[in-house]
Amino acid sequence: MKITVVGAGAVGASCAEYIAIKDFAAEVVILDIKEGFAEGKAMDLMQTASLNGFDTKITGSTNDYTKTANSDICVITSGIPRKPGMTREELIGINAGIVKMVSASLIKHSPNTIIIVVSNPMDTMTYLVHKTTGLPKNRIIGMGGALDSARFKYRLAEALGAPISDVDGMVIGGHSDKGMVPLTRLATRNSVPVSEFISEERLEQVLQDTKVGGATLTGLLGTSAWYAPGAAVSALVQAIACDQKKIFPCSVLLEGEYGLNDLCIGVPVILGKNGIESIVEINLSDAEKAHLAASAVGVKATNGLLEL
């Protein structure tokens, strides 16, 4: 199994590190436009192999897409990150051109690859890859929902005073502060609804804290987060590479599912060796349906800014 990560910044390097440490891939290639940057990150990571006990080979390259040939899975993290006060949508002008060029270059050398999109605005960048590459919908996946759900579970565990391994929850909808739909009604602590343990007011605070999770970190760090995004990507890559048939909320092209068409937005999917094995349509409440529909309106508005 060969994995390519485009973008050797903090998110891309974290992706490569977590994938390597899990030791399910034979090779990870890191690519970056900055001279020597990917090579340096790859060398630094390889020097942890004996300490962290993995045998995955990590190589780096400066913008040479021939080194990515025959990749089974390609991850696109390249683009400019958010700064404090910026929305994900404000990144569209620059990042659209980058993602379009990167995805075309990857497919040229790995026509059978599965692409995972991380670059923001993530739902719109995923849609862009669909519109410009011609790949089947099962082989284009936006990462956002997996990350948002991890942040949701962190906030739930915090509110419950519980170990995070006891908590389960999911976020659907757009990967934006206004578009996320944390499914508080379905969140559980060891199969018991969390509403049995915390008040409606505290659960609403969890929801709001989840929706601004990325902006909170950007304000603290001065740039976008990287550990959790890298871990989220590695979980998706592993589910595909190891054919785990795990359910993750991911941004995928909808063609009638959930009553939505012609957009990419976060919904639960089963991931396996073919990428998206199936889209899971869960029964939403009327309020949840309304929130998802409103999120879709926002995503479509951002898509309208693309020059296709």
Image (spheres, grey):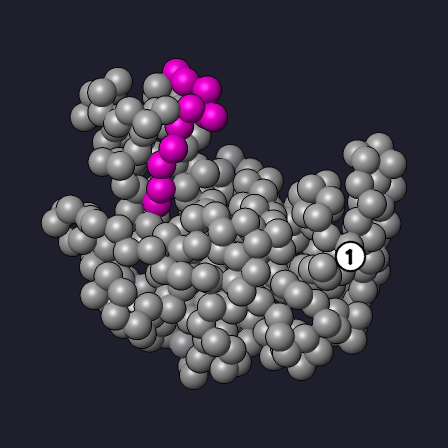
Tell me the element at label 1: strand
Q: Is residue 93 visible to the viewer in this orientation of the structure?
A: no
Q: Residues within 10 Å of mark 1 (few under 14, many from 20)?
A: many
Q: Residue 257, how many percent across, how many down? A: 27, 65
Q: Is residue 31 visible to the viewer in this orientation of the structure?
A: yes
> Does 262 sit left or right of 112 as displayed?
left
User: Closest to the observer: 147 or 98?
Assistant: 147
**Which residue is disc 1 drawn over?**
27
What count of labels does the image hold? 1
The stretch in magenta equals 161-171
> Does 66 sit left or right of 97 as displayed?
right
Q: Residue 9, how many percent across, how many down? A: 67, 53
162 is within the stretch colored magenta? yes
Disc 1 residue type (three-letter): Glu
Q: Residue 188, how many percent across, how many down? A: 32, 29
Q: Residue at x 47, y 26 (%)?
A: 165
Q: Residue at x 34, y 24 (%)?
A: 189
> Does 31 sit left or right of 116 as displayed?
right
Q: Give above or below for 248 relative to 153.
A: below
**Residue 21 occupies which quadrant of the picture?**
top right
